Image (cartoon, coloured by chain):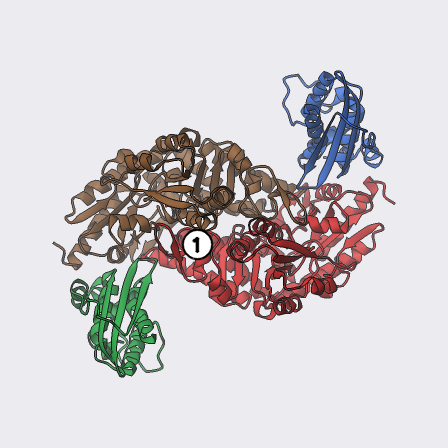
Chain colours: A blue, B red, C brown, D green
């Protein structure tokens, strides 16, 4: 469990310069998530056109993992269809070992290989207390999508 | 004053490794570790004396009752109370709820005020909020100064005839601030208010004398003072306890139960509904014996030593902000801080990799966190088993955090 | 079914002498003895895993949280509940007070009725009396029949639309009667009332399935089922717990605390204000593992065997009256009796001289004692570690009492 | 600790045939005592003329010790002055080791030697759980006298 696996450069970059960090004008859906025990908070707002998430914002306060996860999530989700987003959420949860998957994991050291930049978060898996930090924006996104 | 170093051997958990490092436990403000003497007292109780108390006419039950009541006597002596003024319950939170429901629910009314400090733990806020919903009383808060002390001017100006209860933490679990309880109590009494002291942090770390404080009610927890979980104490002045209604009802707290109403047992039994935490009381008694053997003055000076050293070493780190008094005269061993833009949660993870346990968060004091304008702080807190080397380990860990986060 | 005899070795206290005789412990309905496995689990927790739960971002705190939550899962499995439906607290008494203050105080109003059985323990009476004082609701009682069963006819006729809560003991701690909870619950639900089951005696001694019972709330204590003191369980149906207000407020049960109000954490944490009884939950988990290894059916049949034997032997004694069902199909292992004009307290003293611990008194059920028209009874109660020889010792002691008192 | 020391003949006699067991007409003082834990109850009523307890009744339910103690107490107290009763109460409490005494105990096996019939209760001393049973009527008497 090396800290370098957790605090990758790209994570600190997203933490310090979060993307999609401004509130949307009249979002179609939004949800607030918080982790009362450590104080992480994130608000996710989405704009939907037809079946597509055309815009998204994630604004919050919290640790590097929750805020980087939120920022990277916005980049991964923007422009995707609901179905693609659902698949992304699923893959993310599998990478974090929050959900099991029937798929064979090609490379157990890189369960997030198919997730692009998000793969950088896979180090979190080895820090179980922090998994809920990484997961918070994704839970909140799911709630925003359900509206 | 490292002459307490030898007592580390009494704490089995400190021999443990955590993430490949010797455990450096700096979270005693959340809960303390337990010496073997306490664990042995609990096991011995179950193996030789276990029975329900105050109920049986047989020898074993009498032995159990004696042990339980001995623990009460010990607690009473420790805080300079009469034994009838000491009721056992689950912890500080439970004890304060008992006052809120037993006294507040019967005596507060619309227009009345409950005056709290902004540095209260949720345990001395939420019970009053709940009872306010039923009574219509209003909550008012005393702010702190920029040097993290209670704003006495604000206190005195808020203390008018509407205030019926004043809730004060004797020692803040976030700032470390030791409040001048006696002075605050005198003013509250002059204004006709009762004083409820949250002593969860004070009783474990310094000599507390309820008479000297002139507290009307005072609450603390066993688990923060070397004792087991599941046990706490409500102290109340005899005449107040006698006048107060019990919050919880059930067996052992009654004198008689008729179909539609009941009469209560004598104090303190009136406040101990059902089977009490018997073995836990015995364990707390053993913890107090252990602390008394060291002496609360020695406990305090050990903590003054180690906390001063921590403040000094932390002060050397750039971009590190400490939330709490700089001076040891009015602070305890809880040191909250932030380091540059590194989130406390991240600090905690980095330190944890070196076996160092600190807390990160709002420390169950969100109103204070808001007033400090920080969503979370890191907190290192010390107790008798900590040594200067623990502080050194903390400092080294913080330097690693700076590196990882590329903080200048 | 003496094949449980070997387990006596797991209970260190049973090796003890009392007044020069081997201890014969016949007061398990008041509190049970503890096997080494439970004491070891508690000590091991403190020595290797102790930290506060749900608070720390460090490994030790996570280990502590896991052990605590594992205990919750174990409790939930034991009574066939979901883990979110299981809240830890101090004991049965505390759990029922939580329902009275969390549900009753917010929902009862003048004209409403709380329907209790006359065989309730004070734990399921006094909390409702207290809450009635605040709400104006009225308490009504269902009597028992001459064969010590609940009077079902009376129950059904009392169960009208005014009844908002029905409080039922699943097994009487005095009579031993096992009440038909499911049947009573069906009728209560049809009448629009909630059902609060006092399972303090049931859960330790027989398989309890909350779904099969269709209990809305159900309470029990750890210390009566081989677990430590200071821990109890409130089960509640998920949707009821979600709708219910917390009784106690404090840390760990909140989502956010603003100055004048707060929002609550998810169930079950909403009902666990403050530091919970952590080591005690772990101990209760170990007790449940121990019971599960034996199997609750084996526990029950052992008790059926020993209680039948006790009823038979007691039945041979002249002028001895048993208060409780004669038939084992609907009774547990608590056997209350009186012997001629010998006061139960005197019986207890005489038996105690032979190392035999029984209870004498009203057993925290004064309304029942009044209805039985006896100020006190003697009670022998059995558990897995009792053997037929314990019954023989009891019988011999009762014969000595007859001699001393010159009873024919 | 022999049970014979506790359950002397005279105690069982008082238990089964309690003296002064009928309510008084218009008593000058009365008090109720109870031991909620074991259920013992006793009501003490007194009639006072000048400084003398001219009549007394003790009515109750409870164990042999509490009821015999009550019955024996009524016999010992009737006709005595307040001062004599106070002295009796004190001696009784010393015998029961409820109170310490500066007086040398002449015969440690018979601390109640000066108490007449009441001496029969001294066996209770060796059964600490039962001391409060024996003491209950005396506490109640003291309360009745204070009225
Ligand atoms: C039927 C019943 N209900 C409730 C209780 C109270 O349990 P506790 O004292 O553990 O709160 C008891 C035991 O005393 C009991 O037997
Ligand atoms: C100042 C203060 N008050 C109250 C509490 C609550 O104590 P407990 O959780 O033992 O009820 C704590 C500890 O968490 C505390 O630090």
Above or below, B365 against D119 in this view is above
Above or below, B324 against C37 in this view is below
x and y, in percent, of residue B22 in the image: 67, 47
Which residue ends up furthest to the right in the rendered image?
Answer: B408
Q: Quadrant of the N terminus of chain B?
A: bottom right
Above or below, B183 against C244 in this view is below
Q: Nearer the viewer, residue C391 or C31?
A: C31
All told, the count of numbered labels is: 1
Q: Quadrant of the C terminus of chain B?
A: top right
Determine if residue D2 is in view: no
**Residue identifier under label 1:** B45
Chain for numbered disc 1 = B
Residue displayed at 73% across by 42% down: B345
x and y, in percent, of residue B30 in the image: 63, 50
Q: Nearer the viewer, residue C276 or B160?
A: B160
x and y, in percent, of residue C83 in the image: 52, 34
Could you say which quadrant of the image residue C213 lies in?
Answer: top left
Horizontally, residue C74 falls left or right of residue C163, namely right
Determine if residue A81 is in view: yes
Q: Nearer the viewer, residue B398 or C108?
A: C108
Which residue ends up furthest to the left in the rendered image?
Answer: C408
Residue displayed at 54% across by 68% down: B80
Can you tell me whether the CB of the residue at mark 1 lies under 8 Å from the nearest atom of ligand 1?
A: no
x and y, in percent, of residue C279 in the image: 53, 46
Horizontally, residue B87 falls left or right of residue C29, namely right
Could you say which quadrant of the image residue D122 lies in?
Answer: bottom left
At mark 1, the secondary structure is helix
Mark 1 Cα-neighbour bin, 10 Å: few <14, some 14–19, many ≥20: many
Horizontally, residue B339 falls left or right of residue C83, namely right
Horizontally, residue C261 falls left or right of residue B279, namely right
């Amino acid at each position: 469990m090396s800290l370098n696996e957790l605090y990758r450069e790209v994570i600190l970059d997203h933490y310090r310069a979060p993307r999609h960090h401004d509130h949307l004008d009249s979002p179609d859906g939004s949800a607030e998530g918080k982790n009362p025990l450590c104080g992480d908070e994130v608000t996710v707002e989405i704009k939907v056109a037809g079946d597509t998430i055309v815009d998204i914002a994630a604004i919050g306060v919290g640790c590097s993992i929750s805020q980087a996860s939120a920022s990277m999530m916005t980049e991964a989700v923007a422009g995707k269809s609901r179905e693609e987003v659902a698949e992304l959420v699923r893959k993310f949860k599998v990478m974090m070992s929050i959900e099991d998957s029937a798929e064979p994991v090609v490379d157990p050291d890189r369960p997030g290989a198919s997730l692009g930049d998000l793969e950088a978060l896979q180090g979190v898996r080895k820090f179980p207390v922090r998994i809920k930090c990484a997961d918070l924006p994704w839970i909140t996104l799911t709630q925003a999508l359900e509206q | 004053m490292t002459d307490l170093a030898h007592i580390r051997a009494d704490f089995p958990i400190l021999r443990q490794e955590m993430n490949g490092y010797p455990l450096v436990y700096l979270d005693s403000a959340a809960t303390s570790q337990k010496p073997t003497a306490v664990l042995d007292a609990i096991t011995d109780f179950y193996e030789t004396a276990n029975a329900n108390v105050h109920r049986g006419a047989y020898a074993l039950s009498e032995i159990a009752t004696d042990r339980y009541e001995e623990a009460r006597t010990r607690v009473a002596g420790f805080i300079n109370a009469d034994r009838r003024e000491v009721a056992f319950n689950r912890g500080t939170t439970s004890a304060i709820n008992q006052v809120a429901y037993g006294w507040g629910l019967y005596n507060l009314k619309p227009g009345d005020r409950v005056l709290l400090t902004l540095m209260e733990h949720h345990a001395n806020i939420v019970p009053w909020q709940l009872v306010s919903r039923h009574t219509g009383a209003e909550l008012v808060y005393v702010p702190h100064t920029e040097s993290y002390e209670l704003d006495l001017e604000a206190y005195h100006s808020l203390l008018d005839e509407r205030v019926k209860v004043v809730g004060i933490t004797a020692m803040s679990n976030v700032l470390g601030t030791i409040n001048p309880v006696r002075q605050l109590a005198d003013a509250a009494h002059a204004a006709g208010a009762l004083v409820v002291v949250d002593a969860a942090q004070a009783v474990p770390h310094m000599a507390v004398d309820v008479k000297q404080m002139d507290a009307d009610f005072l609450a603390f927890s066993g688990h923060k003072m070397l004792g087991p979980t599941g046990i706490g104490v409500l102290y109340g002045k005899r005449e107040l306890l006698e006048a107060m209604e019990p919050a919880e009802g059930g067996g052992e707290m009654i004198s008689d139960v008729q179909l539609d109403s009941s009469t209560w047992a004598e104090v303190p039994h009136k406040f101990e509904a059902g089977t009490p935490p018997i073995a836990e009381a015995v364990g707390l008694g053993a913890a107090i014996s252990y602390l008394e053997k060291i002496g609360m003055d020695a406990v305090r000076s050990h903590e003054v030593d180690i906390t001063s050293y921590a403040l000094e070493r932390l002060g050397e780190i750039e971009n590190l902000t400490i939330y709490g008094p700089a001076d040891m005269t009015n602070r305890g061993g809880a040191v909250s801080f932030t380091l540059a833009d590194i989130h406390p949660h991240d600090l905690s993870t980095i330190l944890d990799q070196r076996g160092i346990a600190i807390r990160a968060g709002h420390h169950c004091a969100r109103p204070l966190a808001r007033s400090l304008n920080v969503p979370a702080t890191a907190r290192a807190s010390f107790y008798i088993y900590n040594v200067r080397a623990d502080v050194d380990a903390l400092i080294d860990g913080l330097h690693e955090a700076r590196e990882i986060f590329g903080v200048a």
